[in-house]
Image (cartoon, rainbow, N blue to C red):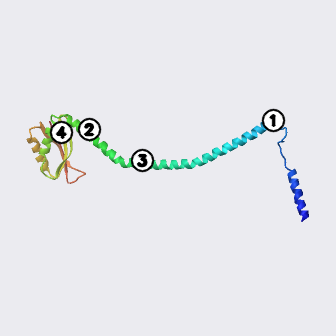
Amino acid sequence: MVKEFLWQLSMAKKKRKNTINLIPREGFTATTSGRILVWALSTFRVVVIVTEIIVMIAFMSRFWLDAQNTDLNDEIKQKVAVLEATKNFEKEFENNQELLSIFSEFSKDHTKAPDSHSGITKSLPESQEFYLVKINYNAENVNLEGRSLDEFSIQQFLTNLESRKIFKSVSLGSVETDQEFAPFMKFLINIKL
């Protein structure tokens, strides 16, 4: 056991003696190359530490940036959903604006339009199988498009229009079977104001 202890002690001494130091401690900093080497080693040590700190900050900030990205994506999805939900309202609003502009154009001519409009509505037959689909006004005439199940209602409407003395002339443009609404007949009437 004593031999073994001595052997370990001698090995420890050998290990201490075998250590190699490439930078001598004495007189090395007095030379130019020694000062440059000491400066480079200390500077690069600081550079490595600063770089590690920057890498750690970047790694830690990634979690914050991921959370921000997720929040922004959720906010974008919510805003897209709101836009999709209001799209129909916006389209309806634009259609109403267009109708209001047409009405304002129509209401500028106060001379003949109200009389002709009331004359047309008062001349409509009381039949439920008769209705007007489209009325086009301009300064000189009115074009009517309508549907009816029988010719008698169309004839009665023409007679009622002609009996009103506010129109210059009333003429029947065409009467034909409507392809879309098979039992109905489609008719066109031109009224000169």
* Marks 1/2: CA–CA distance: 90 Å
Q: Secondary structure at mark 2?
A: helix
Q: Which residue is mark 4?
A: 142
Type of amino acid at the residue the image marks with label 2: Ser
Q: Which mark is residue 54?
A: none
Q: How many C-alpha atoms fall within 10 Å of the one at disc 2: few (<14), some, or many (≥20)?
A: few
* N-term mark: 2 or 4: 2
Which residue lies most toward the bottom here?
1
The x and y percentages for residue 189 are: 17, 42
Q: Which residue is mark 3?
A: 79
* Quarter placement of the N terminus: bottom right
* Marks 4/3: CA–CA distance: 47 Å
Q: Secondary structure at mark 4?
A: strand
- 4 vs 1, front mark: 1
Q: Which residue is mark 1?
A: 33
Q: Which mark is residue 101?
A: 2
- Residue depicted at 72% across the width and 39% down the height: 43
* Marks 4/1: CA–CA distance: 106 Å
* N-term mark: 4 or 3: 3
- Disc 2, disc 4: CB below 8 Å? no
* N-term mark: 1 or 3: 1
- Residue depicted at 19% across the width and 40% down the height: 143
- 2 vs 4, front mark: 2
- Residue depicted at 10% across the width and 41% down the height: 162
- In the displayed structure image, the side of residue 177 where residue 85 appears, left or right: right
- In the displayed structure image, the side of residue 157 where residue 89 appears, left or right: right
The x and y percentages for residue 52 are: 66, 45
Type of amino acid at the residue the image marks with label 1: Ser
* N-term mark: 3 or 2: 3
Q: Secondary structure at mark 3?
A: helix
- Pick the front one: 42 or 166: 42
